[in-house]
Image (cartoon, rainbow, N blue to C red):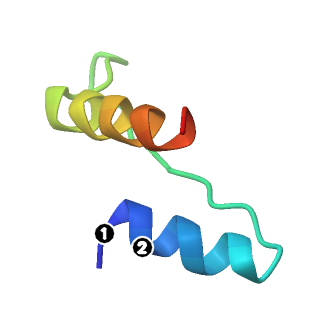
């Protein structure tokens, strides 16, 4: 399943989908998580 699938399914049930991101040891958002956040933002803009 993808972020888009989870979002669509949960929203149909009236549930908000939260994307949890863990920081690295220096308090930075890891690059793969940044990419996921950007992809999710494109979905939400629709």
- Report whether 3 appears left or right of 10: left
- Residue at mark 2: 5
- Sort mark 1 into few (<14), some (14-19) or many (20+) by Cα contacts within 10 Å: few
Task: Kindly state the secondary structure of the residue where label 2 is placed.
Answer: helix
Query: As displayed, is residue 32 above or below residue 8?
Result: above
- Report whether 44 appears left or right of 24: right
Which quadrant is home to the C terminus?
top right
Query: As displayed, is residue 16 above or below residue 1?
Result: above
Question: Which mark, by number, is residue 46?
Answer: none
Give the quarter of the image for residue 12. Answer: bottom right
Tell me where residue 45 appears, x and y as whole percent: 55, 32
- Report whether 32 appears left or right of 9: left
* Residue at the front extreme of this rendering: 46
- Of 25 and 4, nearer the camera is 4
Query: As displayed, is residue 26 above or below residue 34?
Result: above
Cβ–Cβ under 8 Å for marks 1 and 2: yes
Q: How far apart, in angstroms, are the residues tagged by discs 1 and 2?
A: 5 Å
Which quadrant is home to the N terminus?
bottom left
Give the quarter of the image for residue 25. Answer: top left
- Residue at mark 1: 2
Residue in view at x 22 percent, y 28 percent: 30
């Amino acid at each position: 399943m993808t972020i888009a699938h989870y979002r669509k399914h949960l929203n149909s049930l009236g549930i908000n989908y939260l994307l949890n991101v863990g920081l690295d040891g220096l308090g930075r958002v890891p690059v793969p998580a940044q990419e996921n956040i950007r992809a999710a933002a494109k979905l939400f803009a629709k």
